Amino acid sequence: MSDSLTVQNLGEQGLLKRVQSFCPSTVVGDDAAVLPTESGMLLVVTSDVLVDRVHFSNQTTPPESVGWRSAAANLSDLAAMGASPLGITVGLGLPGEVLVSWVEDLYRGITGCLQKYGTVIVGGDLCRSPVITVAITAFGQVDPTRVIRRATAQPGDAILVTGFHGSSRAGLELLLHPELGQELSQDDRISLIQAHQYPNPRLDILPSLPETRISGMDSSDGLADAIVQICRASGVGARLDRQKIPIHPALKRWASSEKAMKWALYGGEDFELVLCLQRSAAQKLVERLGGAAAIVGTITSDSDIRVIDFTQETPDEILTLEQGFQHFSSD
Amino acid sequence: MSDSLTVQNLGEQGLLKRVQSFCPSTVVGDDAAVLPTESGMLLVVTSDVLVDRVHFSNQTTPPESVGWRSAAANLSDLAAMGASPLGITVGLGLPGEVLVSWVEDLYRGITGCLQKYGTVIVGGDLCRSPVITVAITAFGQVDPTRVIRRATAQPGDAILVTGFHGSSRAGLELLLHPELGQELSQDDRISLIQAHQYPNPRLDILPSLPETRISGMDSSDGLADAIVQICRASGVGARLDRQKIPIHPALKRWASSEKAMKWALYGGEDFELVLCLQRSAAQKLVERLGGAAAIVGTITSDSDIRVIDFTQETPDEILTLEQGFQHFSSD
């Protein structure tokens, strides 16, 4: 009976669809909402709500890291739209017994991340809540000709990722199971944990982007999810070259290639950008970005998304949305 | 020991001060943050986090009303700055067992309120949480010459309120204690309950405001709190005429004048505006607004805020911030 349908029964995607029916269709579908302003610039707005023991825990993230990650996730959504940040608001729900030092460390983390990208907290709200809740809204601006959207990828486009994938998930594993990874050097261990606790949204690359059509989003919910979302929104397929997906040397040394690839595709929270653009422009961009940036595949006119192992060591993998996160599932 | 200091020990005002040290001083101190944009218009941003059983309850507010009130509170903060809304984002934390119909009614309430003021939901976030949490960020724009701030009131200014005070608190009392108010007519009862469940932020009056210096804020935390905040920020005092404070006829009929005045001053959530401007401009504005708008007092160069009963039935009352809400108190 529909009257007794719960949020958990319906699942996140189903609930999202129902809720989107209350929003103008022009503003949903990307990492952030885009609104015209009188200046001709687009105002870009994105929100995240993070809840203690759902999105973070004392075991894996000290308060400074909770703050940094919350800010980074929202700045990454701005980067995904090609937008420069104007500021963020921080709404905080707190149980009375939380230590003031915890709250100050949280803010230290938030402002640490913001400072790195030249932006600030411009407002917010404090309230009592039975569970620590961090609600961040970030807003930025972008020239309408430079906005990055999901729905504009075209067959033939190269698929470019701006950096390593899987590191954040590997860092989480080390934090959850401190007995693991004893064979890792101290530096390798720290690299992976840092990737989880203090990720870097890729606002830094915006000035390097060419002035051509670029489609894309960030990989906050995993590289696989990002590619599926772009393909769905653009009505295209894709082929990925398994060997080209950039994986941090520390992760390569530590995990089996199968596990490393699973984390790279489905781990999430690497906060890199996944961009689709003409191959020649993509090649130049990879050179300009350096680091771990790489072309990992091609947009196709197929109806599926295949991860191909050209060494033929593993069979082709078909990506579906269901392999991504399901935030409302009971496990 | 400062290391073991909790949020509850420190209290909301104390925590707010510590947290504000992480924000640029230019953007805090008003109902909303104000940021310059390239167009010359100011971007105004405000956030609220509302938590089940802290800020709302099934007993007093059905989900549609929770949604309406959440939107109204944020739009009221925009109105308090003189800003027209551009849109809002809605971040929602939900336990899995919440009914989908509850969520849809919440959104119906939000969009019902937004529609009335010609604005929309532009984005948001859904996530799992052990407690229903509604985090709304509203943003709007205002011409820099028309922005309303707290800190610019001057001795001699008239203090104008745009409508009735105390009605929302009276409606809450009727909802909490359905056995009360049996002597009220059905219409009176509905008026007060409506004032609590479906308040109207005063964006409607912005076009009527004169192009002169106006200082002010909204009365969401109570009329007394609004006047104290304006006086503190402006470094001025005030005298209020107890008899001039507009109280709904239904409330006058129902409650003792003492109780009605207490609710008018400290009840909160009436979402009217409290404006300070030159007396002649204030008088014209009262005529233009009609309804329950009234001049209730005068800004002075005194160091206190006195509520004076010129009929001498009650002694003068001195307003302090402590009489307002203390969100983190344990009761």
Image (tube, coloured by chain):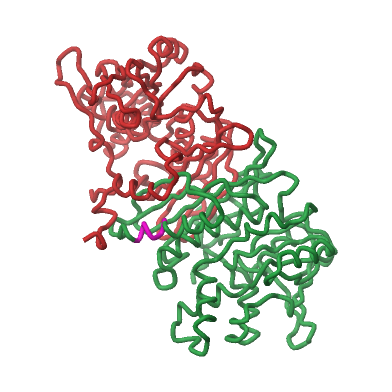
Chain colours: A green, B red
Image quarter of residue B218 = top left
Asked if the stretch drawn in magenta spans residue B34, the answer is no
The structure residue drawn at horizontal position 58% and vertical position 49%, both measured from the top left corner, is A85
Residue in the foreground of this view, choosing between B120 and A15 = B120
Q: In this view, does A109 lie to the left or right of A40?
A: left
Residue in the foreground of this view, choosing between B110 and A294 = A294
Q: Is residue A6 visible?
A: no
| Magenta stretch secondary structure, dominant | helix
- The magenta segment is A102-107
The structure residue drawn at horizontal position 23% and vertical position 33%, both measured from the top left corner, is B320
Residue B161, image x, y percentages: 37, 21
Q: Is residue B311 visible?
A: yes
Residue A257, image x, y percentages: 65, 85
Residue in the foreground of this view, choosing between B203 and B131 = B203
Q: On screen, A54 above or below B253? A: below
Q: Is residue A78 left or right of residue B25?
A: right
Total marks drawn? Answer: 0
Residue A218, image x, y percentages: 64, 61
Q: On screen, A81 above or below A268? A: above
Residue B156, image x, y percentages: 33, 15
Image quarter of residue A102 = bottom left
